[in-house]
Image (cartoon, grey):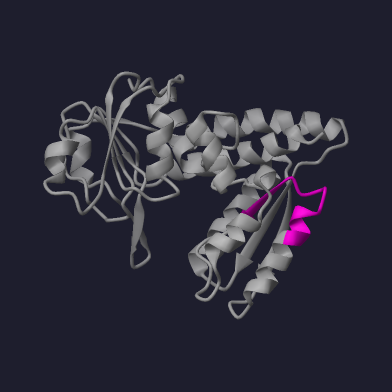
Amino acid sequence: MAELLDGERLAGRIKMELADRVARLAALGRVVGLGTVLVGDDGPSAKYVAMKHADCEAIGIRSYHEELPASAFQADVEAVIDRLNGDPNVHSILVQLPLPAGINEEQVLLRIKPEKDVDGLHPTNLGRLVMGTPGPLPCTPAGIVELLAAHSVPVEGQHVVIIGRGLTIGRPLSLLLAMKRPGCNAAVSVVHTGVHDMAALTRTGDVIVAAAGVAGLVSADMVKPGAAVVGAGTSWSGTKLMSDVADDVADVAGWITPRIGGVGPMTRAMLLRNAVLAAEKVQ
């Protein structure tokens, strides 16, 4: 059976380290502040924001929450962003996606100051990633790299196959893993559900990251024996959270993320790290 890539345990260690940094800032009179914006009444989004608030409280970060109805206009959302941008107590900002129909998500995200972009997805920060210069990294890609390194999964010089080319995971992860930096420096292939004979490509991967949001997309016959398999994409079947990785993959893989407790906790831990970094950089 494959070794579990335990994101819950690793995230706990990271949060302990961040709590020390938050305490040091507090001793200097700087309380780390994260602003969150929730528009509408989407249940999973509200639950996810609540989890982030709990994470913040656990390590001493102060949350500033703004909630707007689904009927809010573009100008209403942007006004909230402007207020948080101008608040010196708020060091980073999170806008929970998706936004209701009629709200231009790109315009809203562009409104956030790059230095307060806790998700690392502002074009300025993605440009820094492309150039290899310091900046907040997208949370899920950064979390996956940390998770693989913590479990001594060979990545440098290996072939990583990423399924999915989305803005939040696939695209930035492909850039990050190809860079010449510790835990990366890999040969990276990006495929998607429109690629002919995807299995022929995934079977060449030493590491597979499934981030397509299609339940059970990766099956055992698509995996090279001993490969590391990361389920980063999720979908819902009624009230059950489903992974992109089928259960039988655990019989073939060398390492695998659990359906719950793998990438999710690491994403939240990296968001906290970005929030702390933003506060540390304030002059």
Q: Tell me: 153 left or right of 122.
A: left
Q: Quadrant of residue 190?
A: top left
Q: Exactly how many numbered labels are in the figure?
A: 0
- Locate the N terminus by quadrant: top left
Residue 66 percent across, percent down from the top left:
70, 64
> 62 and 181: which one is in front?
181
Residue name at image x 54 percent, y 47 percent:
121
Q: Is residue 116 in sight in this rendering?
A: yes
Residue farthest toward the right in the current orientation of the protein: 29
> 27 and 283: which one is in front?
283
- Locate the C terminus by quadrant: top right
Residue 54 percent across, percent down from the top left:
64, 50
Residue 195 percent across, percent down from the top left:
18, 49
Q: Tell me: 219 left or right of 9.
A: left
Q: Which residues are magenta?
A: 82-95
Q: Tell me: 121 left or right of 224.
A: right
Q: Considering only vertical position in the picture, is 12 above or below 113?
A: above
Q: Tell me: 267 left or right of 77.
A: left
> 199 and 52: which one is in front?
199
Residue name at image x 16 percent, y 37 percent:
201
Residue name at image x 37 percent, y 32 percent:
5
> 243 and 103: which one is in front?
103
User: Within the magenta stretch, is there residue 94?
Assistant: yes
Residue farthest toward the bottom in the current orientation of the protein: 71
Q: Is residue 95 in sight in this rendering?
A: no
